[in-house]
Image (cartoon, coloured by chain):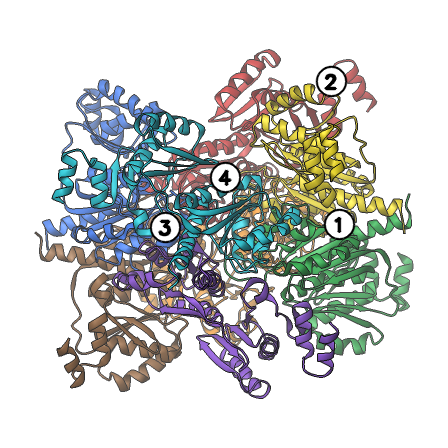
Chain colours: A cyan, B green, C yellow, D orange, E red, F brown, G blue, H purple
Amino acid sequence: MRKLLEAVADGSLSPAEAEAELTGYVTGEAGRFDAAREHRRGIPEAILAEGKAPEQVTALAETALETTDRALLTRLSDRQLAVLESALADSFPDVTLEHRGDALLVETADRERPSVDATVGIVTAGTVDQTVADEAEIVCLDAGVAIDRVDDIGVAALDRTLDQVDRFRRADVLIVAAGREGALPTVIAGLVDTPVIGVPVSSGYGHGGDGEAALSGMLQSCTVMSVVNVDAGFVAGGQATLIARTIDSARTDPD
Amino acid sequence: MRKLLEAVADGSLSPAEAEAELTGYVTGEAGRFDAAREHRRGIPEAILAEGKAPEQVTALAETALETTDRALLTRLSDRQLAVLESALADSFPDVTLEHRGDALLVETADRERPSVDATVGIVTAGTVDQTVADEAEIVCLDAGVAIDRVDDIGVAALDRTLDQVDRFRRADVLIVAAGREGALPTVIAGLVDTPVIGVPVSSGYGHGGDGEAALSGMLQSCTVMSVVNVDAGFVAGGQATLIARTIDSARTDPD
Amino acid sequence: MRKLLEAVADGSLSPAEAEAELTGYVTGEAGRFDAAREHRRGIPEAILAEGKAPEQVTALAETALETTDRALLTRLSDRQLAVLESALADSFPDVTLEHRGDALLVETADRERPSVDATVGIVTAGTVDQTVADEAEIVCLDAGVAIDRVDDIGVAALDRTLDQVDRFRRADVLIVAAGREGALPTVIAGLVDTPVIGVPVSSGYGHGGDGEAALSGMLQSCTVMSVVNVDAGFVAGGQATLIARTIDSARTDPD
Amino acid sequence: MRKLLEAVADGSLSPAEAEAELTGYVTGEAGRFDAAREHRRGIPEAILAEGKAPEQVTALAETALETTDRALLTRLSDRQLAVLESALADSFPDVTLEHRGDALLVETADRERPSVDATVGIVTAGTVDQTVADEAEIVCLDAGVAIDRVDDIGVAALDRTLDQVDRFRRADVLIVAAGREGALPTVIAGLVDTPVIGVPVSSGYGHGGDGEAALSGMLQSCTVMSVVNVDAGFVAGGQATLIARTIDSARTDPD
Amino acid sequence: MRKLLEAVADGSLSPAEAEAELTGYVTGEAGRFDAAREHRRGIPEAILAEGKAPEQVTALAETALETTDRALLTRLSDRQLAVLESALADSFPDVTLEHRGDALLVETADRERPSVDATVGIVTAGTVDQTVADEAEIVCLDAGVAIDRVDDIGVAALDRTLDQVDRFRRADVLIVAAGREGALPTVIAGLVDTPVIGVPVSSGYGHGGDGEAALSGMLQSCTVMSVVNVDAGFVAGGQATLIARTIDSARTDPD
Amino acid sequence: MRKLLEAVADGSLSPAEAEAELTGYVTGEAGRFDAAREHRRGIPEAILAEGKAPEQVTALAETALETTDRALLTRLSDRQLAVLESALADSFPDVTLEHRGDALLVETADRERPSVDATVGIVTAGTVDQTVADEAEIVCLDAGVAIDRVDDIGVAALDRTLDQVDRFRRADVLIVAAGREGALPTVIAGLVDTPVIGVPVSSGYGHGGDGEAALSGMLQSCTVMSVVNVDAGFVAGGQATLIARTIDSARTDPD
Amino acid sequence: MRKLLEAVADGSLSPAEAEAELTGYVTGEAGRFDAAREHRRGIPEAILAEGKAPEQVTALAETALETTDRALLTRLSDRQLAVLESALADSFPDVTLEHRGDALLVETADRERPSVDATVGIVTAGTVDQTVADEAEIVCLDAGVAIDRVDDIGVAALDRTLDQVDRFRRADVLIVAAGREGALPTVIAGLVDTPVIGVPVSSGYGHGGDGEAALSGMLQSCTVMSVVNVDAGFVAGGQATLIARTIDSARTDPD
Amino acid sequence: MRKLLEAVADGSLSPAEAEAELTGYVTGEAGRFDAAREHRRGIPEAILAEGKAPEQVTALAETALETTDRALLTRLSDRQLAVLESALADSFPDVTLEHRGDALLVETADRERPSVDATVGIVTAGTVDQTVADEAEIVCLDAGVAIDRVDDIGVAALDRTLDQVDRFRRADVLIVAAGREGALPTVIAGLVDTPVIGVPVSSGYGHGGDGEAALSGMLQSCTVMSVVNVDAGFVAGGQATLIARTIDSARTDPD
């Protein structure tokens, strides 16, 4: 403790880093950032940009970079992104940015991204499902999990699905995002013995169009699979990452 | 009118037949029977046995036989059937009975069943969906429509579905009954250009298991099809019959 | 295959046309266009303009024109239409445009629109239902199906409905769009033996005003008919077209 | 007060009558009976037999007879009725009974039933709606309101509805009970300028079959009418009675 | 017919008036106006301004004035009102306008407003319920029904409700509008024997705050009353008007 | 620990008592009993008899008596009660039983029931709400809280409610149970400044009759109060007990 | 009365104060203010700023200040606050303002805020729940109740919750606000014997994200607690205040 | 093929085995058994006994034993079990039976149960959740996955949960079954980095008591986890088995 405070005193540790070290949390103007979440749950706290002011998004991202060497952002608008990029040019000039649709991973030069020896397949039924799948992908990317992404495999064109069966089998876990009636995860899960996580997407209109038809369809699936909430690509990516890590441990240290 | 009453007087017409002729309705102890419905809508009134006393079912069936030369019954229990058969042995000894699961078509010797030159394919996803499909089949049977029935074509075993595609294409209309997530009509409709009528079935449990998941899934289908209510096999059979008749007319009288 | 690539090489085939020929799909900046859908299902993929940038709408329309000789667009705003028209003036100067409310059919001079010998009646209950009926109409128009449109036949003024019964009978299939309590399809289906497809419309307010009252009413209809999702005029038009084509085949080739 | 207690003492008033006089309530083994309700609201408390033991039903009916000279019972089973009739033979040998389906009005010889100079039309769409309409009828009967009952006027047979329009117009208020899609009140209300009270009936199956489709349809009706809860025939009868009484007052005492 | 056309020819009848006379409808750019509705149902068609362009509102109002001598408008924004007033200054300079919140009645000098000898009490629970009550009031005003309006009688301040009981009793019919838990109609209906029409209002937040709590509470009311849809002040006013007219007839012509 | 095991060995402590002492739980054939719950939360675990075999109920009650000197049982059928009483006559011959409807408190002679110096008022709207209120009462009884019970204070007879206002004011906390539209808690809470806990009861039929109308009405109440789940009389009693104990502490030890 | 009017006449009492004195209400342009609510229910009427024009908010606040010496405002936007502050600088230059997030308490110099000897603990699960907790806090602040606020005690970081158990125990009542799955109140209530009031917050997305998951979870809680509506921080604060006052009375006057 | 038929002919293969070999299905009186499901999906078809006649259950079990050397049965009543055991004593005298609550695994002596080197932790919140967890366990048992079962870890007694954290960490996957508010999976998932599959259980009453509160709570969980349908213990066990097998492969064959 003494040491830590001395480090703050001599400037080798920022107050935020010290607070994170001591409590696991950093509390700023833009809210609280849970720096210790990854330690506890294995999945870092992401910054959901939707509904936040660009300045809040930027402040939270900077806190995340300061205390965990990277920031994970989802549902980022163009304007939020522009403000963030301009601020980072000053505050963290050496970071690298990787985009997945509206999701973003920012990493400092100090970060050594882990490498997980397991593959998560991420499949979408249609173009509108890609934003949700991007959230899943950014979590896997951050965790260093291998990703195999296959887009636009709709049930309405079954041939395209059947063509990819071998690829689905090679993945260790599959995330399948689908809106409307949400039948794709069921069709894929009926063809392979890979664990499937279904993600219902709110892309329809009329009765059940807010993702409820897809959610109830996946819960009622006549095959075996598990499900996350409507549009919860981040949760699906997190769950797949936890599974991938367990597989990686088994590979690395089989006993 | 005079003539009709004379026919009642001399016994060549029963009062029920006369009432049906004049008003379209026959009113008995067991309720009202709409003898003219087929004339108006092309589909006869069926007797939904569920929730009725065996004697009521029998009385309604006898009224139907007297005024329209056949009776169409659905959701018939073993006890209702036994009472009906025993009564008919006395009242209508010459009728023939055709069973489709819990559904039954009784016809007098006088009835000349029409022949409709069009085929309705009736497909079920699982064993539990067959009762609903039987209701659809009995309507088509009564109307003289050709029927091609294919059972147990579940999405969980996609190969079996793919094997039948040519058969699906040969039908003029398809009725597809499915419970749980109700994906089968979507999968089939994505493979053929035959019109598909989806029938959701209440065969699951948990969230959406009362047919609501299947119903919302079929309404949200990413392909083109129309839908009837949960367990409404009779309505699907009626709609398919109306379409089959139109096709038959076009075949018979192409101009 | 060789031939196809040579055709691309010598410019007689665009890359998009070649991709469509080979995979059925064309993937551009604005998303994926399913050029082979009509081949599979008999109904082309329409471009749902709602929620897309005018440039995306235009790009998708141009891809559709390039690979299938026409584009079908629905829920088009004034601004999207203006951008589209201006772009087409350059890229496809010889196309013809047919409007049905917010829906649009664009056809190149090369396209020979088919002619289907069957009539789809399209009926609306009120002014607010017309946009949904327009979607149904544009699909039938594209397919070359004969259309008989009757607007403003509300249940509140029953005389107007009764006046049109003969016209309803002459149609081979009827699409009936109605919001609020959605009683019109039931009333019409009780009067004629033509197959009826009900389309619930989200035109009310209060309990059930988002189309749910109309949807549940049509599903519970005491007469025979089938239903599509709330506001799903496009699906109703597609289903009617599939039925009309079957009738046309029966007329053209009665055996 | 003194007088009342003396009357109890000398036996010319029963304790129950005295309690009712003083508090408006009579409390027995079978529960509380609100003897003063009619005074306050104009509609007496009915005894809902459903879910009660035959002895409870009988006890409540006897309390009602003792304090208000008649008993109004609804949803009475055969066994409840048998026990009641047998008990009344002893306790109230001079009562008269009027049945309306499962509903019953029992009156002592002392009761002078009022006569209300106004007519309530009660209309049902189908046989299954009659039990609900019977509840409405028994309330009107008790109040001495003139009743015009028309059964089996379904939307599926529109001619029968149109035939009765003049009769509907002659009523001062109309109660229309309908299950399934519940379109009948809307159709009738669109044809006449009589106030209509819609009663949704829980007679369907599948989505909305518990009366919810009919309820939401009546609430969304494109014409003017008011509604009571699903199966609430008693409430509809009460509301119609209150209106009928106001009309009667206006007739009797026009100024 | 000849006469009518001659009248159009010589300008003493506008084409709109002639169309209305012949068909009951007038069809303009802004949609259809049902000029004959009042004749059929006793309640004129109102112009729901919400969601319409100010020019459409104006055009519909002018058609209404031309064919029925007055226009009834609801949910009118400030801008719609300004455009309407400015247009009417030219087209119908002699009209008079009566406002009730966002609702408006415009009458030409030719119109002789009827006088109905019956009183409708209109009661609101809170300030937010007044807009809905205003819709009810404008319908009664147009019909010439006497109105007794009492505002801000919330259940949270029961004394104020109890103070008004005599006033409630003097009305022939009561309309009671209430949001949140919607208890006011029940409390009032328990105190008087006047018929009560409950109007649930969408003025809350959280579970049931969109008027559903008030609607279900009024449907479940332990006293007798009928209900209209959430925010349907217009329907409540129409229903009360129909009842008031029947009472007026009874007063005017007691036999 | 040693001591405890010696006590078991010499028979002065039963194994169940020892398990409860060590872990807080006792696990028997009939399931687990949470003997330490009262210590943690202040409210003992009750035995919900509904759905259990009479022998299971008895076994759980005996375990409760053995480890906590009393047993609290709710929703007890006549048969379950008979079996329990007969078994207790052998196993715990000295217990005393207090009944509140279907709820029961059994206490050994060893138990010294606490005395809490605070009063919980328990109010019901109708006869059907009493079972739910009985559950609340048994919890208060067990805790030694003073109870003031007032039944049958319905909104339909407002005078009876107003008569009791002073009594409501004298309570420290009020529990108000009401079904149908559930307006009673709102009416009472608007009259007094005592904290009110509303309990919705599932006593209606039709839309919202399963307690949902009452629940949403109480949540939307225009006055201040808190709510428990439908039929959750036990939870209401527990919450009132926790509040009563805090008040008792304040009275006993004011600083 | 005479005296009061003389006071108005000589200007020592404003008309608003006199109206409040006589009727409990003050009616202005911006609506009605219920000045007597605190007297009746113990909780003053708050001004919900959401959806009101800044001028309306200001007018209501000034009326509240004039008649009750303070104003309680919730859900205040920046613009509404600016207009209010600028107006008060003129009309009530001596007031003091206390902010709690978007909630505000304004008090005149004349007001002597009461002091209640009891503590309400206010706990939030996450940053998004703070606005709702602020509403609860402002009510307690106004009432002079002691407040112990603990923020960001999420279930995802259970250690932080466990660390605060002693603090939770010291409170007399706990308000716990939580969105998403709303598990925090259950976890806390399982650890302490303080009464807990749960407040569900609408902070999620997807199925149940509008606060419905949290609401149903709190209603189903396996421990004892009561609940208010989604986002109803004001109601929770009011209920806690009523309980705190009862405790304060018991402390002040133990007999 | 020839060989297979010869084997049938000489009796070394039963017709059922041959049908299973050729089509993957065996069709008997009691319905269809999908013998090839395990091959496709890795999870065998279980026989859901609920709602089937004891003879049907027995017939399906015998088919399963004949074609796959074991039968997996769930939701088995005492009577179904007795009939099955008695029949197997004749038909398959050498089988061994393992019970997990109402679930049962029957294996022939020929079956060599696989051994999967991975552990599935199965946790229940309360006694009522055990039946659902038993279904999960029987699937893992059949697959040869190691199981660590922990019962009665409720949120109401948090200490017991915290005591087991190390055990939860040692599992490779966790299945957590919980009814009521369903908070347990969230609490556990917040403490460990093992993948968690939540199973909502329908064990409550009132609003959300049919498992909907638990389902929506798990979908809204503020930590990372996936979910299966209400009471779908079988699906959870299947999904955990698929994950366990992937881990086993990684351990066995790390490259």
Give percent across and percent down for residue H148: 37, 69
Q: Would residue B63 be found to the left or right of residue G200 on screen?
A: right
Residue F127 figure quarter:
bottom left
Report x, y in % for residue C219.
64, 51
Q: Which type of secondary structure does the marked residue at label 3 adopt? A: loop
Q: Which mark is residue B194?
A: 1
Same subunit: marks 4 and 3: no
Type of residue at label 3?
Thr
What whole-number distance in Å separates the C-alpha atoms at marks 4 and 3? 21 Å
Front position among marks 4 and 1: 4
Per the image, the residue denoted by label 2 is E13
| Residue pictured at 69% horizontal, 72% vertical | H19
Looking at the picture, does residue G202 appear above or below residue B178?
Answer: above
Question: Mark 3 = which residue?
Answer: H223
Does the residue at mark 2 contact the one at mark 1 (Cβ under 8 Å)? no
Classify 10 Å Cα crowding around label 2: few (below 14), some (14-19), many (20 and above).
some
**Based on the displayed image, in which of its 4 quarters is residue H11 positioned?**
bottom right
Quadrant of residue H40 within the rendered picture: bottom right
Q: Residue at x 70, y 35 (%)?
A: C18
Looking at the rendered structure, the kind of residue marked 2 is Leu
